[in-house]
Image (cartoon, rainbow, N blue to C red):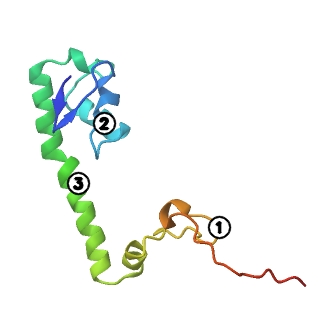
């Protein structure tokens, strides 16, 4: 099982799919990296040679933030929004949806289980 940037890559998967197991690399980025290194996307991860694995790791590490560095950047951005008290930061603080979704009937995964209010009467006209 090859190990790239601290992530175990699955043996039996094609290398273009296996690269997506790294946080920060999606299908499009994986194909672009393979094209830049002139590696065939249909190669299985177990068939990669040591020098190819090293070349992949070096190229990915130099060209883009991935894994811990990227997670740290995302957290710093969220904390900056919270500190400057902008609208998005306030939504993060209250753990509500940030990108404009409705909250009256949805967003249960963000808000948690329902808090039932006792003695709430239904008005009928």
Query: Can you identify the residue that label 2 sits on?
Result: 21
Count of numbered tags: 3
User: Can I make out residue 66 in this image?
Assistant: no
Badge 1 marks a residue whose secondary structure is loop
Viewport quadrant of the C terminus: bottom right
Residue 90, how many percent across, how many down? 40, 79
Decide: is 104 above or below 2. Answer: below
Q: Is residue 115 left or right of residue 86?
A: right
Q: Is residue 116 left or right of residue 51?
A: right
Q: Is residue 113 left or right of residue 58?
A: right
**Neighbour class for label 3 at 10 Å: few (<14), some, many (≥20)?**
some
User: Can I make out residue 62 in this image?
Assistant: yes
**Neighbour class for label 2 at 10 Å: few (<14), some, many (≥20)?**
some
Task: Mark 3 and mark 2 in contact? Answer it, CB < 8 Å.
Answer: no
Label located before the other in sequence (1 or 3): 3
User: Which disc, if any, is residue 105?
Assistant: 1
Query: Can you identify the residue that label 3 sits on?
Result: 70
Decide: is 86 above or below 53. Answer: below
Q: CA distance from mark 3 to mark 2?
A: 14 Å
Decide: is 63 above or below 88. Answer: above
Q: Residue at x 17, y 33 (%)?
A: 4
Q: CA distance from mark 1 to mark 2?
A: 34 Å
Query: Which residue is situated farthest in the right direction here?
Result: 125
Residue 3, how many percent across, how many down? 17, 30
Q: Residue at x 27, y 81 (%)?
A: 83
**Neighbour class for label 1 at 10 Å: few (<14), some, many (≥20)?**
few
Residue 102, how many percent across, how many down? 59, 69
Q: Residue at x 39, y 72 (%)?
A: 92
Viewport quadrant of the N terminus: top left
Decide: is 53 above or below 46. Answer: below
Q: CA distance from mark 1 to mark 3?
A: 33 Å
Q: Is 56 in front, or is 105?
A: 105
């Amino acid at each position: 099982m090859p190990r790239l940037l601290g992530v175990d890559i699955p043996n039996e998967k094609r290398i273009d799919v296996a690269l997506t197991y790294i946080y920060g690399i999606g299908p499009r980025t994986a194909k672009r990296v393979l094209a830049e290194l002139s590696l065939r996307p249909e190669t299985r991860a177990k068939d990669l040679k040591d020098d190819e694995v090293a070349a992949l790791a070096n190229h990915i590490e130099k060209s883009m933030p991935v894994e811990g560095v990227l997670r740290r950047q995302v957290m710093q951005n969220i904390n900056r929004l919270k500190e400057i008290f902008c609208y998005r930061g306030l939504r993060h603080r209250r753990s509500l949806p940030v990108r404009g979704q409705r909250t009256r009937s949805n967003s249960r995964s963000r808000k948690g289980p329902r808090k039932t209010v006792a003695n709430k009467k239904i008005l009928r006209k």
